[in-house]
Amino acid sequence: MKKLSLLCLSGLVAACNAGGTLNQPIARDLYSERAIGFLNPEIELSFGRAEIIGREIGTFTANRRTNGSNKNSDTACQIAFLSAVKSLQERAVTEGGNAVVNIHSYYKGVPEWSQNTYHCEDGHIITAVTLRGTIVKK
């Protein structure tokens, strides 16, 4: 029985890691129907590296996961991405900022700067996106 339990557990772990790393388009997901009404239009967003204009409040990380079961990779990544962006926006409101700039992927603590794509880890069961951004008051 122990061997069967271990076999099932190892199969579950393998299934969680079965998807892989995907680079998804920011614009497609940021301007999707799902984003409308979900994201805060009052909090400006800027992806990639740029000069910070305004008073820098701090740099924060948002790691969001979603259940990838019964979803294709694009949908699961989009949900996790939008949740991470919304988390950064909510932090901006809490901290008194009105923009999140220099947003970049930050998977396992490794920055990946891009104005066009974000990093998504799709494990089919769990899909995750980690973003890091600097909150500013313009």
Image: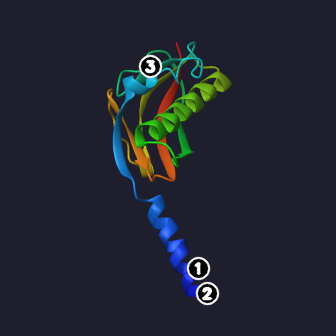
Secondary structure of residue under mark 1: helix
The residue beneath circle 2 is 1
- Residue at 54%, 18% in the rendered image: 36
Residue annotated with mark 3: 31
Amino acid, disc 1: Ser
Cα separation, mark 1 vs mark 3, equals: 44 Å
Q: Position of residue 137 (x, y in %)?
A: 55, 16
Residue found at x 49% / y 29%: 134
Are discs 2 and 1 less than 8 Å apart at CB? yes
For marks 1 and 3, the one nearer the N-term is 1
User: Front-most of 99 and 58?
Assistant: 99
Q: Earlier in the sequence, mark 2 or mark 3?
A: 2
Real-space CA distance between mark 2 and mark 1, rounded to the nearest whole angstrom: 6 Å
Which mark lies nearer to you, 2 or 3? 2
Front in this rendered view, residue 30 or 32? 32
| In the rendered image, the vertical position of residue 59 relative to residue 95, given as above or below | below
Q: Which mark is residue 17?
A: none
Assess disc 3: are there few (<14), some (14-19) or many (≥20) residues with their C-alpha within 10 Å of its C-alpha: few
Q: Which residue is mark 1?
A: 5
- Using a 10 Å C-alpha cutoff, classify the residue at mark 1 as few (fewer than 14 neighbours), some (14 to 19) or many (20 or more): few
User: In which quadrant of the rendered view does residue 47 lie?
Assistant: top left
The residue under the point 64% across, 22% down is 93
